[in-house]
Image: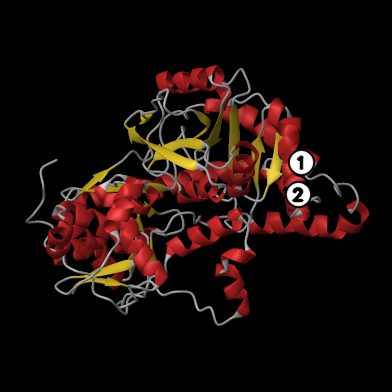
Amino acid sequence: MELYLPYYKYFEQYGHKSDALFHALKAGILSGAISAGTKLPSSRQLALTYGLSRGTVNVVYERLHSQGFVRSVMGSGTFVIYHQLDVNDRSLKLLVNDAELSDWGKRLVEIELHRGQVSQVQRGSTDPISFTLGQVDVTHFPVHEWNRLMFGQVREQYKKESVDAYSSEGHAPLRESIAQHLHTFRGINVNADNVVIVNGSQQAIALIIQLLINEGDAVAMENPHYVGLRNAVHSVGGKVHAFPVDDEGIVFTTSTACSYKLLIVTPSRQFPKGVVLSMERRQRLLQWAEENNAYIIEDDYDSEFRHYGRANEPLKSLDRNGRVIYIGTFSKTMMQNIRLGYAVLPDALKNWFTIAKKVYERHPSSIIEQRALADFMNTGLYDRHIRRMKRIYRKKAELLLKLLTEQMQDVLALYPIDAGLHIYARWKGTEVEFEPFLRCCEQLNVQVADARASYLGDSEQAFCLGYAHLDEQQITDGVMRMVEARKNVGGVENIQSN
């Protein structure tokens, strides 16, 4: 098919061939000029049209696929699967009408539109097995004890209604319990006054970014990274500069051409690769922050679950000058639907953060759960639960690692699994096999988390396997389905040397 794209206009804007082609195609899809169901030109045809290499076109098609705009069908080609929003409803008209939204609102719409709408793949009749991220094992949670504490707080609610009425920073006993827990188990000396309770770590990160970042400001983070971090920066008009990650963590370099007010890292267990930031690089980051009057957000999302060896102390434990903002969450250690997290703020930011939080909620939310959680921690039930889940998760991690090593080490390079609740697996097979492998997994009713969306710019072919919520039989069956998918795409015969 012939396809007109304002490629050269985008090349003038972005200065990079793959970025120009990607944005030209994306703009055509979002505008409806390239409608859902359209078959895109082959990589050879599009390369000849615009004087590009086939490799550049393939990279662009992979980016479009990872963001949900297109789907490749083996032997048939690449098809657009993004459907425009139905704007017949007035609320949706207001959503996409630029005149109705602020600059911040328009950026949110752009971020949401980029998600695309992925069509459903025809799956088999077997029960679904999902190695998705973020889920936990709730079968071993002490429900009876938790319910007892919750019911107790419900009964006392009217007596305590005004106690925390305007405490936007959260229930004081819970903040004290968190401070004590961080001191005992994470080596952080923190005053409870510097702890603020939030509705999950994402809220804390978004508020900090809103407080510190203006439109056009550059924010540094790891590459790959959690997509929610990138979206939060883009929502305020900030620019993301993503730095590569090696076996020692982020490779952070600075130049006079760009200054950063904020760096976001996951030093205890890099997301999603799982590597630990070396001590030398930790010290360099702290020195950089001090010399440049900058802040570092440390997202410590799942390092509570250490399977082997002694846990590395957080970056915050080395911070002597109030440069690190430490973020933690209970969504991984408790239950996923307990949307409570916390931020440990330096003195210079704590009051401003609390004021910003009051813009969204003057009164603390989930106050009954906050009070119950304080009791849960103070009675030792929380620590006991963590110790039990460490044993359970380690057993699951060992099983998954064993199966993947035995069955798929010829096509997968596995990253460290000393801690955490997922494995990062890099694809060692040929590039042309990766997409068919993922599609075949979907058809066999096993879902993996495609890691390419976590990259800004060029990405490596990889996926993540979250295992916390699966039992041993599901883990085994899931790996066997992946083995079958690998065989179906001829992965054994075409492995590249690594």
Residue 392 appearing in the image: yes
User: Judging from the image, what secondary structure is the residue with disc 2 in?
Assistant: helix
Circles 1, 2 touching at the beta carbon (< 8 Å): yes
Mark 1 belongs to which amino acid?
Ile
Q: Give whichever of 184, 339 is nearer the camera.
A: 339
Label annotation for residue 359 = 2
User: Judging from the image, what secondary structure is the residue with disc 1 in?
Assistant: helix
Mark 2 belongs to which amino acid?
Val
Q: CA distance from mark 1 to mark 2?
A: 7 Å
Vertical comparison of 437 with 189: above or below: below
x, y (%) of residue 409?
Answer: 19, 48
Residue 274 position by quadrant: top left
The image quadrant where one finds the N terminus is bottom left
x, y (%) of residue 396?
Answer: 39, 50
Q: Give whichever of 405, 198 is nearer the camera.
A: 198
Q: Give whichever of 384, 453 is nearer the camera.
A: 453
Left or right of residue 4, residue 464 in this image: right
Residue 79 position by quadrant: bottom left
Vertical comparison of 399 with 246: above or below: below
x, y (%) of residue 52?
Answer: 16, 53
Residue 138 appearing in the image: no
Q: Residue at x 62, y 75 (%)?
A: 91
Left or right of residue 107, residue 179 in this image: right
Q: Residue at x 39, y 44 (%)?
A: 272
x, y (%) of residue 267?
Answer: 46, 32
Label annotation for residue 355 = 1
Left or right of residue 159, residue 171 in this image: left
Q: 10 Å neighbourhood of mark 1: few (<14), some, or many (≥20)?
A: some
